[in-house]
Image: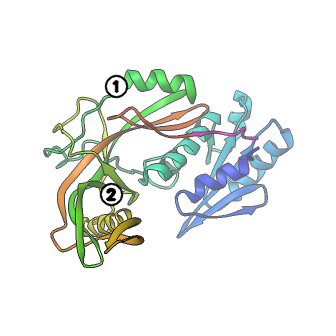
Amino acid sequence: MTTLNAVLKEILESRGFLVDQAGSFVRGRRENIELHFFPYARHSPAAMEELIKTAPSVKGKVVLAALVSLAESTLAALPPEVVVWDREAVEHEVGRTRIEKLVGEEDHGLIDDLYADDVPMLDDLPGMGEEERIIPMRMSLQDVVELSSKTVGGFSHRLELVPHFLFSYQVPLYVGEGKIGGREGTMAVNALTKDVQTWDQVPETVASLDLGHKRLEPVLEEEDASALVRSTVEREHTYERDMVRENGQVTMTERVTVHPRLDLGSVKPLGIYYVPIWCVEGTKGVMVLNASTGKILSEDYFRDIS
């Protein structure tokens, strides 16, 4: 069972805060910012009285994280500087941290509002209307709503375009100094997570999507992505095999190593392709799906918070 303190620690650490326990508060410190979360997992008049007395003297923002419903009289008694997160808000932030880990990109969360007056979203920013190579969607919003409602109890469905550097490669295969064949193919590098994937072919693309979405920006340079592909090609096409040799009337089987030989032109860049990804937050967990294939990339179910 996951404790509320542990969940609040995870939320704070997702934004780079150093976390410790300061009395009854889970405290996060980063540069000149301090956030103090008061965990309130069950009704406790004594705990509420403590919060009301100590909150005014706490340096930094104070957040009451309540997993239980609060009476109007209780809310009215809170000092004006206390921000209240209900159970849904806590679950929302937990879902955000899990999805950010999976897609490798930060999204605006409730925690950001605690220490920033205006954190701009990246949706529909000027200059982002240029023609893009987006892989067509096969999974509509209706599809993902129906699927996620039966699994994670989805209530938030976000469409993101994840950039991938695409490369083609063509390499000869050698045993020693003797050429025995060749290999060619297509590889993509996730420009956020650095994950290298083999694609069957160069996909068809569209220039835009009708649905609202967020286009994520690469955190990886194309040169670095190319180096990842070269090392992957080298690794995947280096293997051992048995080779039969005839020596007069004697037939011998020899174990040899097959390896590719890469030169400067072996790997060619084909540009950035955007893969549409559905990121779903739900009451039971989070889910990430590839909208172009319908494949579930990840499911992460919450454990009970107490």
- Amino acid at pointer 1: Ser
Is 187 positioned to the left or the right of 243 in the image? left
- At horizontal 43% and vertical 50% (from top left) the residue drawn is 103
| Residue 112 visible in the current orientation | no
SS majority, magenta? loop
Asked if residue 213 lies left or right of residue 1, the reply is left
Name the residue tied to disc 2. 191
Q: Quadrant of residue 84?
A: top right
Tally of numbered discs: 2
Seen in the picture, residue 79 relative to 13 is either above or below; the reply is: above
Quarter of the figure with residue 142? top left
Kind of residue at disc 2: Ala
How far across and down, in percent of the image, does residue 231 sit?
A: 34, 69
Residue at 45% x, 24% y is 145
Instruction: Give me the residue at 23% from left, 29% from top.
Output: 210
Residue 270 position (above or below residue 215): below
Dot 1 falls on a residue whose secondary structure is: loop
**Quadrant into which the N terminus falls:** top right
Residue at (24, 66) in percent of width and height: 180
Where residue 29 sits: x, y (%)? Answer: 60, 65
Q: Residue furthest bottom?
A: 177
**Membership of 56 in magenta stretch:** no
Crowding at mark 1 (Cα within 10 Å: few <14, some 14-19, many 20+): few
Residue 301 shows in the view: yes
The residue indicated by pointer 1 is 140
Could you tell me which secondary element the residue under label 2 belongs to? loop
Residue stretch in magenta? 300-306
Tell me which numbered mark, 2 or 1, is placed earlier along the sequence: 1
Q: Which mark is residue 163?
A: none
**Left or right relative to 182: residue 80:** right
